[in-house]
Image (cartoon, helix red, strand yellow):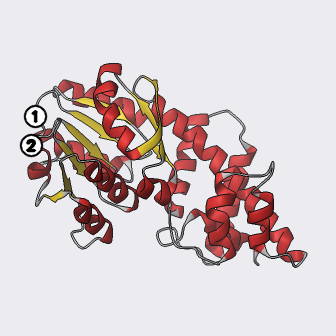
Amino acid sequence: MNKLAYVGIGIMGGGMAANLAKKGHSCRVWNRSQESSNLKRALDAGCTNAESIAEAVNDADIIFTCLSEEKDLDEIILGKNGIADHAKKGAIIVDMATTGPECSKKFAAKLKEKGLQFLDAPVSGGDVGAREGTLTIMVGGDKDAYEKALPYFECMGKSVRLCGPNGAGQAVKLCNQVLCAVNLVAVCEAFALADKMEIDRQMIVDICGAGAAASWALSTLGPRIAKDDLAPGFRLGHMLKDLNLVKDSSQELSLPGVDLSLEKFADGIKSGADVEKSGTQSMILAYQK
């Protein structure tokens, strides 16, 4: 059995690491904040806390990370006393955040020089999917490394797919974020119309969600919007970061749906949404002026 480490125990990482432990795998974890409720969730499930990155990864065969942005990867993976300084030769580093295809290719090349393997494996499914082990996991990288990591991906997700070489998982995730963001516009507009016609929002979730209009956004975020619950399952700031990665990757391609989504998120922020403390469902505030 491979030894596992998980670095970055946030909303998503906490659930994923917990599921590895629940399935009987030894997993050592490290998080910058030791007071995190997400870290507590992982430890309660059976993970072992490490006092440093070195302690977490020094004998691990597979090292999972879930960090927010490229600068965090630079610091935690390649920085002084980072993962690359302490991981054993041949270890597989798996980043499960969304950082874009070019970032993945860059890290794969730099880690290869250090005798380490790299997989990009961004996920979709939000906090519920992370807790319940039902994430969709999109992987880019070497097939042999993927097959070694696959049993552990299957502890964290219900749908796992090797999409191609390094960067391919990130590319599919950006397409996923376009679908999520534009779909959320539709959900918010349906609720705005329901409010105008004095129809209960939960009725839209229950009835429309049982027909052709069904979607993850409606069934998962719809009930939160109906209860005015803006707490993050997936932070607004993360979605804005992802959509800006889409814009960077699309270059000359016209994506009016993405532009509209960014506009509505911006309107939501003007109406009180907090990029760090609000979830993506806070877009609804843009329709409540």
Q: Is residue 247 visible?
A: no
Helix, strand or loop at label 1? It is loop
Mark 2 / mark 1, whichever is N-terminal? 2
Q: Which mark is residue 58?
A: 2
Quadrant that contains the N terminus: top left
Q: Position of residue 125 (x, y in %)?
A: 52, 51
Crowding near the residue tagged with mark 2, few <14, some 14–19, many ≥20 C-alpha atoms within 10 Å:
some
Mark number for residue 88? Answer: 1
Locate residue 47, reporting x and y percent.
Answer: 20, 57
Q: Nearer the viewer, residue 111 or 28?
A: 28
Could you tell me which residue is drawn at 75 percent across and 64 percent down?
206
Is disc 1 surrounded by few (<14), some (14 to 19) or many (20+) residues within 10 Å? some
Q: At label 1, which amino acid type do we have?
A: Lys
Percent across and percent down for residue 58 are 9, 43
The label shown at residue 213 is none
Extreme-right residue of the structure: 197
Looking at the image, how many numbered discs can be counted on the residues? 2
Query: Cα distance, mark 2 to mark 1?
Result: 6 Å
Say whether marks 2 and 1 touch (CB < 8 Å).
yes
Residue 104 quadrant: top left
Rendered view: 5 above or below 184: above
Residue drawn at 66 percent across, 33 percent down:
252
Q: Is residue 26 left or right of residue 283?
A: left
Q: SS class of the residue under badge 2?
A: loop
| Front-lying residue, 159 or 35 | 159
Image quadrant in which the C terminus is located = bottom right
Q: Say what amino acid the circle numbered 2 marks.
A: Asn
